[in-house]
Image (cartoon, grey):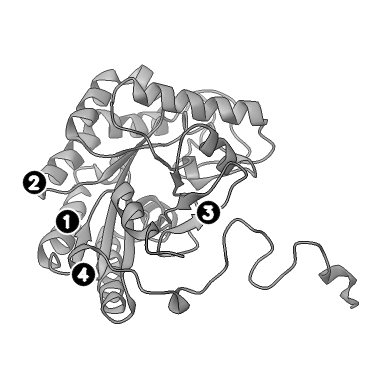
Amino acid sequence: MSDELLSYPRRHYGMDHDRYRWSMLQDRAPIVWPDNKPLALWINLSVQHFPLSGEKPVVAPPGALTMPYPDLRHYTLRDYGNRVGIFRILTLMQQYQATPSVAISGALALRYPRLMERLAATGYEWLGHGWNMLCMHAGDIEIATESEWIAQTREALEAFTDQPLKGWLSPGRSQTANTPELLMRNGFSYQCDWVNDELPYPFKTDEGDMTCLPSCLELDDVFVLTQNLHSEESFVQQVIDAADLLIEEGQKQGGRLLALNLHPWLVGQPHRVSAVKRLLEALLVERSDAIWHASPGSIVDAAITQID
């Protein structure tokens, strides 16, 4: 085969784009977290709205309704998370004095105002999480349409909180080629969609630099429990195993990050919520001397000043 197919303008060492500078984690200067703890822990609660009807997106989000509309069986299960499951999770977070972030679908502001008020009362950091779980930032979505989704989400969330909204987690961690620029135009300074690292890193856009805070797909509860079909016990053990390894690496090589994403419609179930309790006990009590648990914005702020 000739070299013709391997020659193109963006081909260069590392990767074929200029969104960020390529580097291997082991070669970077070490990150130091507050109190010199080796591991930063970010817990996120994804509070979502899955519409009962509407045009299905080209790319289905995790947890998508799978039956022909109206898919009442799966819609009501997702609705359960916002009516029941979320309050169990919030009770546990308060019991363990956890400080998770909450990624919220903008449409919830119209449909669940009491829930929004309850979430605002926690003081937890909020992230934009798209308009709803059918509005996937993927494929050939028009720029104007995608920009409207982002702007509407910000406006809807800001109606219930005075905190500055800095972070964004797309539905299904999806992005188009335009998403980073549109996020910057709409006032978001970091995004959590890319899962290619274990530490925050600078991310370039045509609107200026933002930060990528990687969210761990492999330890996402939906991924582990509903896609990989692992048991709750296995899920807990996988998170603990990851924490122990990252603590060991952090002690030797510099600070590491553990990102844990939870969905109330899934782990807020009465037969699963004990798994969340065991995780909080293991991470925030048994390993508290090694783990700095903080909001995503605090983790970004602590890391970005130490990264070239």
- Give the amino acid at mark 3: Phe
User: Distance of mark 1 from mark 2, alpha carbons?
Assistant: 10 Å
The local secondary structure at tag 3 comes to strand
Q: Secondary structure at mark 4?
A: helix
Give how far apart the Cα atoms at labels 4 and 2 are: 25 Å
Q: Going from the N terminus, do you reach mark 1 or mark 3 first?
A: 3
- Location of mark 4 (residue): 36
Label 2, secondary structure: give it.
helix
Q: Is residue 108 visible?
A: no
Going from N to C along the chain, the mark reached first, 2 or 3, is 2
Q: Crowdedness of circle 3 by 10 Å Cα count: few (<14), some, many (20+)? A: some
Instruction: State the residue at coordinates (33%, 52%).
Output: 301
- Around disc 2, counting alpha carbons within 10 Å, would you say few (fewer than 14), some (14 to 19), or many (20 or more)? few
Residue 280 circle label: 1
Q: CA distance from mark 1 to mark 3?
A: 31 Å
Observer-nearest of 173 and 226: 173
